[in-house]
Amino acid sequence: MFTGIITDMGRIRAIEQRGDMRARISTGYDTAKIEIGASIACDGVCLTVVGLGPDWFDVDISAETVSKTNLSTWAKAKRVNLERALKVGDELGGHIVSGHVDGLAEVVDLRDEGDSTRVTLRAPEDLARFIAAKGSVALNGTSLTVNEVAGREFGINFIPHTKQVTTWGDVAVGDRVNLEIDTLARYVARLAEAG
């Protein structure tokens, strides 16, 4: 489990296509404190550490994960949002995030509002009903509050701090981002369906 509070920005050092895709990610984390088998959310996708170096870690990415996320766009030197898994006693600053991406949202508009940036995204039709104004979503692993919803489109506001410590400072219209809906919304919808 994660919180959606990004604690490092990694950079793709290498991508290799084997039976699965393998990525080497540079990190500022103390890799001496990471174990093989640890979970790290990379752009919101929970991935397992399979190799370690002094300032990098390796992850294997299955074809299933590549097909459901934006990880197919990863290339050498691309920056990615990173978060280590929660430990008992850690502060829950964002919201509960599983690292299991539900689909891809598309950035359809960007505009500056003061020092912040307002981003409008379009959710896949089957996920739009789970997104509510003032509710939470995780986008590329970042816990965010939804400002407004209109049909399949929803708005997010990025303050300067978020743009500096995450990859959201690089966002552009047309980007497809990993979307994880709020766990509570998923269960409420399921209960409503069950009657």
Image: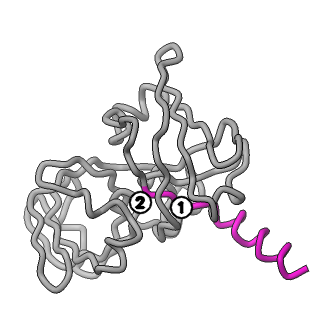
First along the sequence among labels 2 and 1 = 2
Q: Amino acid at mark 1?
A: Glu
Q: Residue at x 69, y 69 (%)?
A: 186
Mark 2 to mark 1: distance in Å? 8 Å
55 sits to left or right of 158: left
Give whichever of 11, 71 is nearer the camera.
Answer: 71
Q: Is residue 56 above or below residue 142?
A: below
List x then y, in percent, for residue 123. Answer: 57, 53
Is residue 185 in the magenta section? yes
Q: Which mark is residue 180?
A: 1
As helix, strand or loop, the secondary structure at mark 1 comes to strand
* Main SS category, magenta section: helix
Q: Which mark is residue 126?
A: none
Give whichever of 142, 189 is nearer the camera.
Answer: 189
Q: Which mark is residue 44?
A: 2
Give, as a single range, the part of the protein colored magenta.
Answer: 178-195
Q: Is residue 151 above or below residue 102?
A: above
Residue 172 quadrant: top left
Q: Amino acid at mark 2?
A: Gly
Is residue 51 in the magenta section? no
- Whether residue 87 is visible here, answered yes or no, is no
**Disc 2 to disc 1: CB gap under 8 Å:** yes
Give whichever of 12, 70 is nearer the camera.
Answer: 70
List x then y, in percent, for residue 30. Answer: 20, 59
184 sits to left or right of 125: right
Q: Residue furthest top?
A: 114
Q: Residue at x 25, y 57 (%)?
A: 73
